[in-house]
Image (spheres, helix red, strand yellow):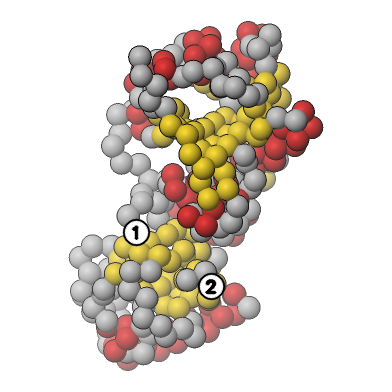
Amino acid sequence: MQYINESKTIHLNQLGGYGKMQQRIIKDHRELFQSDYDIAACIGYFDGVHLGHQKLINKTIAVAKEKGLKSALITFDPDPWTVIHNKNKVNHITPIKEKMRLIASLGIDELIIVQFNKEVSKLEPQVFIEQILIPLRVSDLIVGEDFKFGFKGAGNVAYLQEHAAIFFHTHVLTFKEQDDKKIGTTLISQAILKGDFDRANEMLGRAYTLSGYVKQGNREGTRIGFPTANLDVVDEYVLPPKGVYAGYVEVKGEKHKSVLNIGHNPTFNHSKELSIETHILDYNDIIYGELLKQSFVYRIRDEIEFPSVEALIKQMEEDVKIALEVLK
């Protein structure tokens, strides 16, 4: 058989940061050759790379340094949930490129991406251990207390401790609780969908951010003195509800305060499709085609259809004042 798995080094400047991280793509777990070095690894889908995930990653790095191993993060693509439930499009807090950037920024040596398909979803726990974890030469596996793996989630922490102890040591972490609920991707998604960025950002450990390229718009904002960058967001992000938000936008490596609108521009009645537009404060450069990273800090108000352009301008002036107060 031909070995079709891939390995390459990802430089963080390609992902909006600095440093480098080795990336290994496992396209076919059946052809996974024995690795030539031991690793300390955490494992999971890691959507959001939230504070709980960061705890796992930091522990993995610490164990690796203590034992003289490479640190690794094992994840899956596409999202196992979408494969198991036959879903084509599911929005995520961190689509794969954003997730890679965040993981690399935390200092992991190697990102291992296992291509997830129906066959992988049906692997019994012991087969998963023998065909994936052992060939990867996992010496120490770092997991959360609710970690499950294998067909229908039959494998768990107790299974690892009983059946995998001769192959590797399993470290089990508990997660901090907030308001009697664990930090989790579902809770963060729910907070984003409500526009509750106090809660979402607290659990993420950073401001929620999406990326998109600036595309040509109708220039209505420019004509009324509030030029906006219209974002073409290709990745499937979890989007907040329609409305106006205060946040920060990174453009050409620099961070600026901004007021963002998500909606249909009802006053001008120009947008049948949902539009995402950001008014960058104190910034006038032409940036068509540039990649912007827009963060969300505070929900200012709902999207409103105004009786006149003058009423809209007056409200936008008030929006900017609120944003400056929030972001100061």
Residue 295 x, y percent position in the rendering: 50, 64
Label 1: which residue? 233
Q: Residue at x 56, y 80 (%)?
A: 324
Q: Is residue 124 above or below residue 61?
A: above
Q: Is residue 196 above or below residue 282?
A: above
- Visible residue check, residue 52: no
Residue 68 x, y percent position in the rendering: 75, 30
Residue 211 placement, left or right of 208 = left
**Residue 158: which numbered mark, if any?**
none
| Camera-nearest residue between 142 and 146 | 142
Q: Quadrant of residue 143?
A: top right
- Visible residue check, residue 67: yes
Label 2: which residue? 254
Residue 75 x, y percent position in the rendering: 50, 33
SS type, badge 2: strand
Q: Identify which amino acid the numbered label 2 is placed on.
A: Glu
**Callouts 2 and 1 close, C-beta under 8 Å:** no
